[in-house]
Amino acid sequence: MHRYKKYTNRRLYDLDSSKYVTLDDLRDVLLSGDSIQVTESSDGADITRGTLLQILAEQEAQGHEVVLTNRALEQIIRFYDQRFGGFVSSYIEQSMLLFLEHQDQYRTQMKNMTTLNPMNAMRQAMDMWTSQANHKKKE
């Protein structure tokens, strides 16, 4: 785990390498598979979650694809009021773990979808529907 302090001037300090870093540097650490912990320099309060949310916001501001849509964020906020926060948090975490376990399969499927000719994909879908309809007629 990489440890950082955030100072009142909003600068982030890497406690392990003894240098100032940026949110992009923290993102790179996360992309490498490591975890981070960020604390306030003044009182030692853990501000990791807020920093992670800030990294997400910066990703979207830089033009990366939106992962959490406005609608999803609105619903998450509503869950807090309905006292489902803990359940939803666990559900999202478990869903992410399951996705990570199968990400290679998803990646392969997505690659196959993007390399297909749209007309061939439509033709395959039509053939499938036609064969199912013919099968039902025979019954």
Image (spheres, rainbow, N blue to C red):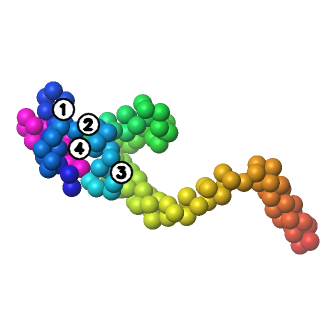
Residue type, numbered disc 1: Arg
From the viewer's perspective, is 69 left or right of 86? right
Q: Is residue 24 left or right of residue 37?
A: right
User: Residue drawn at (38%, 56%), measured in percent from left and top?
Assistant: 93
Looking at the image, residue 138 sits to the left or right of residue 18; the answer is: right
For the question of whether residue 87 can be seen, the reply is no
Q: CA distance from mark 3 to mark 1?
A: 21 Å
| Secondary structure found at label 2 | loop
Residue under pointer 2: 22
Mark 2–mark 1 distance (CA, rounded to whole Å):
8 Å
Q: Which residues are magenta?
A: 36-47
Q: CA distance from mark 3 to mark 2?
A: 14 Å
Farthest-out residue, bottom: 139
Q: Residues within 10 Å of mark 3 (few under 14, many from 20)?
A: few
Total numbered circles: 4
Residue occupied by mark 4? 48
Could you tell me how far apart the alpha carbons at marks 4 and 2 are, in whole angstroms? 14 Å
Three-letter code, disc 4:
Thr
The secondary structure type at the circle numbered 1 is loop
Q: Is residue 16 left or right of residue 26?
A: left
What is the three-letter code of the residue carrying label 3? Answer: Leu
Looking at the figure, which quarter contains the C terminus?
bottom right
Residue 25 falls within the magenta-colored stretch: no
If you read the primary sequence from the N terminus, does the residue marked by circle 3 or circle 2 appear first?
2
Instruction: Tell me the quarter of the image containing the N terminus.
Output: bottom left
Q: Position of residue 39 (x, y in %)?
A: 15, 42
Residue assigned mark 1: 11
Report which residue position mark 3 lands on.
31
Where residue 2 appears, as percent x and y from the top left, is 20, 51
Q: Is residue 92 visible?
A: yes
Rendered image quadrant of residue 44: top left
Residue under the point 15% across and 47% down: 17
